[in-house]
């Protein structure tokens, strides 16, 4: 029964995307079918084979070792305060400040041309297998490693080639992804195996949904990728310094957004409770999203609470939702943990509309206006992608 509900959820997601499509006749059905097959194979391989489990374990162990190294740096500067204090202090010092170390590693790997090499050839392989244009394929892979703004800046020299549909796809990939620099922070809150599996799943899902909503066909002669080097470092140590500064900026931005969003959510919940006799916004979102959660594989007894978490992520951001879900991990089933974690591991929320539109505006003011124009369509598409990823994960849990 669970598998049938999951398949129904996939059909519904693809059906909604089809109804939203602005060019139904030119949808790349072959590419979409291949990406769906790759999602199913990847999830089965990672969850249901010894080799897949070993790979997840090795990657998780690698991240944990990096977290240990990062914690040494944090403890040296803070002198143990992160351990002695409680509440938000522990989260800021022991989770957010680790972003600095991860951003430093990312910057160094970029300077050494290791990441660009990996991204370039993975993007080429994805384009060859699926038939998607090279710019969209490269951007999708690039979005796994870099944040929304950085991923779009990397292809800024190509923006003159992007039609509205192509612009939609690259924006959807940026919104449906997460930055590798903050994956370590996610691993400090939620189970590693689900966070790590979510990365490729969400890359494919964003492309699948966006390719249905905004199909593209590109002449092979025009399908050339010229990548903008987002790292201006002239030496190894300059790359380290730039990465550390970028990481510190990201950590402070996340902390600032958390303060604003959590406080605002409390205000809205207080107002809701006063108007609707104790009923909060999150409870309302829980009831609205619960039927969808059921189709995704979440048991009905847990669907309302899970729906509230997923709704919180959409109206605030993934960090706020993850912090709330972290307190529920021991109270819900493993399937719910996996499905919700995969859903949360993306940037698909209202605030991302502004981030992406602002980035594109800085690159090309005319195209920035177009992104703002289809901002809500972008959020709906990215959310459908998160639902698709979480549903596929649920089929194998």
Image: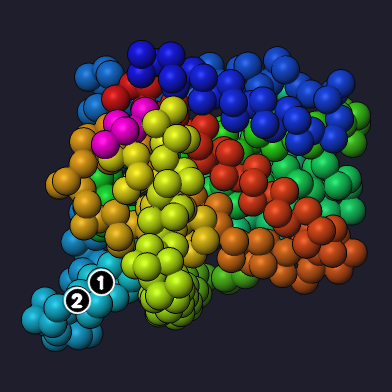
- Residue 336 or residue 207, whichever sits in front: 336
Image marks 2 and 1: residues in contact by CB distance under 8 Å: yes
Marks 2, 1: nearer the viewer:
2
Within 10 Å of disc 1 (Cα), the crowding (few <14, some 14-19, many 20+) is some
Residue in view at x 31 percent, y 33 percent:
300
Q: Which residue is mark 1?
A: 91
Q: Position of residue 104 (x, y in %)?
A: 41, 67
Q: Which residue is mark 2?
A: 87
Where disc 1 sits, the SS reads helix
Give the left or right position of residue 70, taking residue 45 as reference.
Answer: left
| 49 in relation to 134, above or below | above
Residue 257 colored in magenta in the image:
no
Give the left or right position of residue 18, taking residue 114 as reference.
Answer: right
- Residue 368 or residue 64, whichever sits in front: 368
Q: CA distance from mark 2 to mark 1?
A: 7 Å
Where disc 2 sits, the SS reads loop
Choose top left, top right, bottom left or bottom right for residue 371: bottom right
Give the number of the disc on residue 378: none
Within 10 Å of disc 2 (Cα), the crowding (few <14, some 14-19, many 20+) is few
Q: Main secondary structure of the magenta part?
A: loop
Residue in view at x 22 percent, y 52 percent:
328
**Is residue 109 at least partly visible in the picture?**
no
Give the left or right position of residue 85, taking residue 95 as reference.
Answer: left
Give the number of callouts: 2
Choose top left, top right, bottom left or bottom right for residue 51: top left
Q: How is the image coloured?
A: rainbow
**Is residue 379 at least partly visible in the picture?**
yes
- Residue 298 or residue 329, whichever sits in front: 298
Instruction: Give the magenta-colored segment's residue range.
Output: 297-301
């Amino acid at each position: 029964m669970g598998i049938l509900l999951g398949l129904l959820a996939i059909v519904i997601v693809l059906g909604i995307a089809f109804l939203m499509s602005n060019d139904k006749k030119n949808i790349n059905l072959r590419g979409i079918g291949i990406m769906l097959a790759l999602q199913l194979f990847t999830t089965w391989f990672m969850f249901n084979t010894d080799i897949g489990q070993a790979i997840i374990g090795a990657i998780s162990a690698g991240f944990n070792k990096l977290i240990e190294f990062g914690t040494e740096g944090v403890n040296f500067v803070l002198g143990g305060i992160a351990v002695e204090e409680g509440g938000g202090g522990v989260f800021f010092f022991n989770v957010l400040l680790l972003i600095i170390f991860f951003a430093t590693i990312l910057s160094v790997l970029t300077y050494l041309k290791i990441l660009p090499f990996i991204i370039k050839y993975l993007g080429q392989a994805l384009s060859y297998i699926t038939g998607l244009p090279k710019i969209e394929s490269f951007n999708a892979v690039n979005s796994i490693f870099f944040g929304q703004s950085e991923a779009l800046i990397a292809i800024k020299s190509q923006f003159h080639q992007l039609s509205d549909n192509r612009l939609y796809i690259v924006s959807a990939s940026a919104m449906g992804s997460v930055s590798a620099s903050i994956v370590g922070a996610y691993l400090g809150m939620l189970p590693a195996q689900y966070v790590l599996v979510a990365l490729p799943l969400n890359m494919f899902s964003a492309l699948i949904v966006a390719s249905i909503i905004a199909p593209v066909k590109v002449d092979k002669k025009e399908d050339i990728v010229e990548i903008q080097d987002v790292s201006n470092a002239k030496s190894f140590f300059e790359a380290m310094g730039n990465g550390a500064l970028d990481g510190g900026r990201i950590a402070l931005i996340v902390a600032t957004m958390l303060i604003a969003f959590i406080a605002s959510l409390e205000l809205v919940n207080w107002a809701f409770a006063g108007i609707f006799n104790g009923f909060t916004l999150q409870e309302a979102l829980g009831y609205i999203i619960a039927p969808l959660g059921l189709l995704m594989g979440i048991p009905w007894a847990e669907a309302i609470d899970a729906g509230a978490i997923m709704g919180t992520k959409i109206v605030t951001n993934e960090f706020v939702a993850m912090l709330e879900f972290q307190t529920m991990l021991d109270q819900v089933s493993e399937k719910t943990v996996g499905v919700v974690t995969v859903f949360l591991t993306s940037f698909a929320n209202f605030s991302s509309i502004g981030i992406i539109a602002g980035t594109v505006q800085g690159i090309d003011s005319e195209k920035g206006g177009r992104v703002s124009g289809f901002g809500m369509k972008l959020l709906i598409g990215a959310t459908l992608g998160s639902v698709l990823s979480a549903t596929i994960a649920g089929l194998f849990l």
